[in-house]
Image (cartoon, helix red, strand yellow):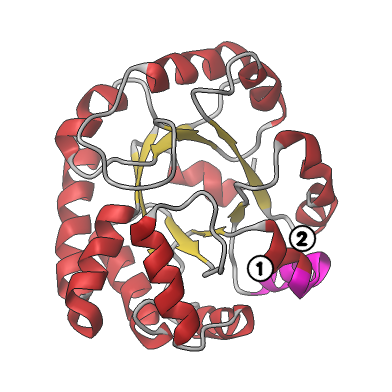
Amino acid sequence: MNNVIKSVFDNKAFIPFITAGDPSLEVTEKLIISISEAGADLIELGIPFSDPVAEGPVIQEADNRALKGGTTTDKIFDMLTRVRKTCDVPIAFMTYANPIFTYGTEQFMKKCKEVNVSAVIVPDIPYEEREELIPFCKKYDITMISMIAPTSKDRIHMIAKEAEGFIYCVSSMGVTGVRDSIGNDVIKMIESVKEVKDIPCAVGFGISNPKQAEHILKTADGIIVGSAIVKIIAEHGENCIPYVKEYVENWCSYIHDFK
């Protein structure tokens, strides 16, 4: 396992998601540093894409704002080069196959290595097609994060056996977005993973407050929160940094003290 990813899960982890370039790359740069100071264990950084099939309307709108603002993959790499002068928080890219293939898979992974991106999450590449990326991930020591969902069922053992870093557990069916409640399917998924492999499991899709996370954290190793944070960014725009920082601080305080 990538040592950086391994250290993220020394204790229960909080993983916030933000979209690169929303509302601007300048704000994203400051957000990464601010969220790191707030205690985030790993930041999931979305590369905006015109057809983000796993995303609900909140993150789709963030992608659109970022793309309209001129955000490109190269500009994101340049921004991270600046970030790395002062901030070493672990980062995982959330992206899709098209941006990686368009950029050039080897060149993309090489650039990830240069700006110290530890992992990639690519929801539209199923387990059976991961070999399109794995050789390049291994060459540049980039961890490809596997995802499982309630529909994975019999495939969970197969996916868990080959998984590296941590497993992204999708809490419920559908696209990303805040939900009123989280079912127990995710607990069963984590238990199925642990039967096969001792690998951290982080739960995302729909979690927006600690009360939802309480029963999940008894089994899960980390919580991923995206849409709730992107909503704060959409509401406050260029002035979002202190609001996002406070939100992340509250989450980190809860999770890092969780018993």
Q: Which residues are magenta?
A: 102-114
Task: Please name the predominant secondary structure of the magenta segment in the image.
Answer: helix
The 10 Å Cα crowd at callout 1, few under 14, some 14 to 19, many 20 or more, is: many
Alpha carbon of mark 2 to alpha carbon of mark 1: how far?
8 Å
Q: Is residue 24 left or right of residue 154?
A: left
* Front in this rendered view, residue 31 or 125: 125
Mark 1 or mark 2, which is nearer the start of the sequence?
1
Identify residue type, mark 1: Cys
The 10 Å Cα crowd at callout 2, few under 14, some 14 to 19, many 20 or more, is: some
The reply to whether residue 21 is visible in this rendering is: no
Residue at figure coordinates x 17%, y 47% from the top left? 253
Residue 9 vertical placement versus 217 (above, below): below
Q: Quadrant of the N terminus?
A: top right
Q: Which residue is mark 1?
A: 112
Q: Which residue is mark 2?
A: 140
Q: Is residue 82 left or right of residue 119?
A: left
Q: Quadrant of residue 112?
A: bottom right
Q: Quadrant of residue 222?
A: top left
Residue 27 place in picture, x, y as percent: 33, 83
Does the CB distance between marks 2 and 1 fall below 8 Å?
A: yes
Q: Is residue 31 magenta?
A: no
Residue at figure coordinates x 64%, y 13% from the top left? 154
* Front in this rendered view, residue 143 or 89: 143
Q: Is residue 113 magenta?
A: yes
Residue 219 place in picture, x, y as percent: 36, 21
Tag 1 secondary structure: helix
Residue 55 vertical placement versus 256 (above, below): below
